[in-house]
Image (cartoon, grey):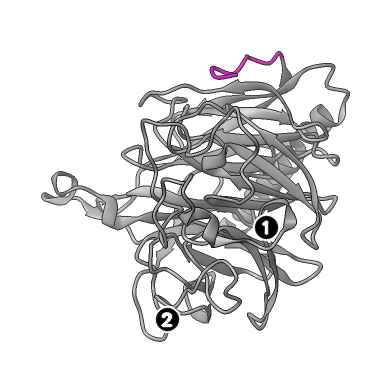
């Protein structure tokens, strides 16, 4: 009898998710007429963690094929006054269901692989592989695990990066995504290197890489007289109270700086966040350049373009782009890269941000945003359909 009841409950729950998905697709498939996706924060998501656990800076977030939300955080960023009593750091990898209940947790140093010094980026592919990266100065590796945390493969070796044209090692990976049809892993590489690099998902073999405008990256650019950033760890050095190390009124920077995110749209276009250069660049999968868009070009140190998600309509009409410096989320028309509106503001209350670092979008169009620095939380923004855009706080 109990089993029968649970079966009915499961069927009802799946049906409600399907209805929500159909509603969200229908809403976005209609002509927007200047309207944009609108959202409402869910202040009760996620539910409290067990075991008196706390999370540090959120460094990656992803929604898997089951609709589960995966997070990687940095336990090392918890302050002594947070953990000196009964509270302790949660394991770095956390899996939540749609209700915000923790389902699994694992991660950290172990046998057979080199755990990163500074966790950064998580992606769960359709084969249930969990990919993790690291944004630290010596983090030159990507790790591949099963969904229960069993180690499978490492690409690159810690401390062995030789620069942005190294085909064997990474350099401060920020995030990654998988092209399922082509069986390829795309990496935003990242904080030390300045490129996108692609590997075979199964073997880890190098396939190709490119820098800004689809050209071969040139690290010597960061040691020239006009640049104020020292090599080799040039990407992560930021002058927080100065413009993002390029002249906003001058020519566009010829090189990527912090390659913070890479995402692939349904039509095959590849979107790259060049974070501290305040721009999105768009490519084809072979690395050929298509377009670029600067957003909030006067932004100080940490930059304005941190991560990208896509709306859930078949055409993916909108990009959702978080800005962890100006503490807002831009709604961007994908075909023209025009900023149509924004939501959010600085603060610690529900719906506000301190370091809106990474984001993910589920099949219902809900947006999950993880905060870094001392934000140290995840927020869920429920998709409410199309509505009138609010102007961005920074043009």
Q: Characterize the local packing of mark 1: few (<14), some (14-19) or many (20 or more) Cα atoms within 10 angstroms.
A: some
**Magenta range:** 388-395
Quadrant of the image occupied by residue 189: bottom right
Which of 75/39 is in front?
75
In the rendered view, would you say 5 is above or below 204?
above
Disc 1 vs disc 2: which is toward the camera? 2
Q: Secondary structure at mark 2?
A: loop
Residue 102 is inside the magenta segment: no
Residue 172: give x, y in percent of width and height: 47, 62
Q: Is residue 93 visible?
A: no
**Contact between labelled residues 2 and 1, with CB atoms less than 8 Å apart:** no
Report, in whole angstroms, how far the alpha carbon at label 1 lies from the one at label 2.
26 Å
In the rendered view, would you say 295 is above or below 125?
above
* Lateral position of residue 29 relative to residue 41, left or right: right
Which of 58/295 is in front?
295
Residue 298: give x, y in percent of width and height: 53, 26
What residue sits right under mark 1 in the picture?
Answer: 65
Q: Earlier in the sequence, mark 1 or mark 2?
A: 1
In the rendered view, would you say 210 is above or below 247?
below
Residue 148: give x, y in percent of width and height: 49, 71
Q: Is residue 387 visible?
A: yes
Q: Residue at x 39, y 43 (%)?
A: 238
What residue sits right under mark 2 in the picture?
Answer: 113
Q: Characterize the local packing of mark 2: few (<14), some (14-19) or many (20 or more) Cα atoms within 10 angstroms.
A: some
Q: Residue at x 65, y 56 (%)?
A: 66
Q: Secondary structure at mark 1?
A: loop
Residue 138: give x, y in percent of width and height: 38, 69
* Lateral position of residue 10 relative to residue 21, left or right: left
Query: How many numbered marks does the figure carry?
Result: 2
């Amino acid at each position: 009898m109990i089993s029968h009841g649970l079966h009915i409950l499961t069927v009802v729950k799946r049906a409600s998710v399907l209805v929500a998905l159909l509603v969200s697709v229908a809403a976005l498939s209609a002509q927007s007429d200047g309207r944009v996706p609108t959202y409402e924060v869910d202040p009760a998501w996620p539910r409290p963690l067990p075991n008196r656990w706390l999370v540090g800076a959120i460094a990656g977030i992803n929604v898997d094929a089951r609709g589960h939300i995966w997070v990687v955080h940095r336990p090392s960023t918890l302050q002594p006054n947070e953990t000196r009593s009964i509270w302790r750091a949660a394991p770095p990898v956390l899996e939540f269901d749609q209700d915000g209940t923790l389902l699994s947790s694992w991660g950290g140093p172990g046998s057979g692989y080199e755990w990163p010094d500074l966790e950064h980026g998580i992606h769960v592919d359709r084969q249930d592989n969990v990919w993790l990266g690291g944004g630290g100065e010596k983090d030159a590796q990507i790790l591949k695990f099963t969904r229960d945390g069993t180690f499978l493969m490492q690409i690159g070796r810690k401390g062995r990066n030789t620069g942005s044209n190294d085909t064997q090692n990474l350099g401060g990976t920020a995030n990654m995504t998988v092209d399922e049809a082509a069986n390829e892993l795309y990496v935003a590489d990242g904080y030390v290197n300045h490129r996108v690099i692609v590997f075979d998902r199964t073997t880890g073999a190098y396939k190709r890489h490119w820098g800004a405008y689809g050209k071969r990256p040139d690290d010597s650019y960061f040691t020239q007289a006009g640049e104020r950033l020292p090599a080799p760890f040039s990407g992560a050095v930021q002058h927080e109270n100065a413009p993002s190390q390029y002249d906003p009124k001058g020519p566009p920077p010829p090189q990527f700086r912090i390659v913070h995110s890479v995402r692939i749209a349904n039509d095959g276009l590849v979107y790259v966040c060049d974070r501290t250069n305040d721009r999105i660049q768009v490519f084809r999968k072979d690395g050929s350049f298509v377009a670029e868009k600067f957003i909030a070009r006067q932004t100080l140190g940490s930059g304005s373009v941190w991560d990208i998600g896509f709306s859930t309509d078949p055409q993916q009409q909108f990009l959702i782009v978080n800005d962890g410096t100006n503490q807002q989320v831009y709604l961007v028309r994908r075909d023209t890269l025009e900023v149509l509106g924004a939501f959010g503001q600085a603060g610690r209350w529900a719906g506000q941000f301190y370091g809106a670092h990474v984001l993910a979008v589920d099949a219902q169009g809900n947006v999950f945003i993880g905060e870094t620095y001392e934000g140290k939380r995840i927020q869920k923004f429920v998709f409410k359909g199309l509505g009138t855009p609010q102007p961005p706080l920074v043009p």
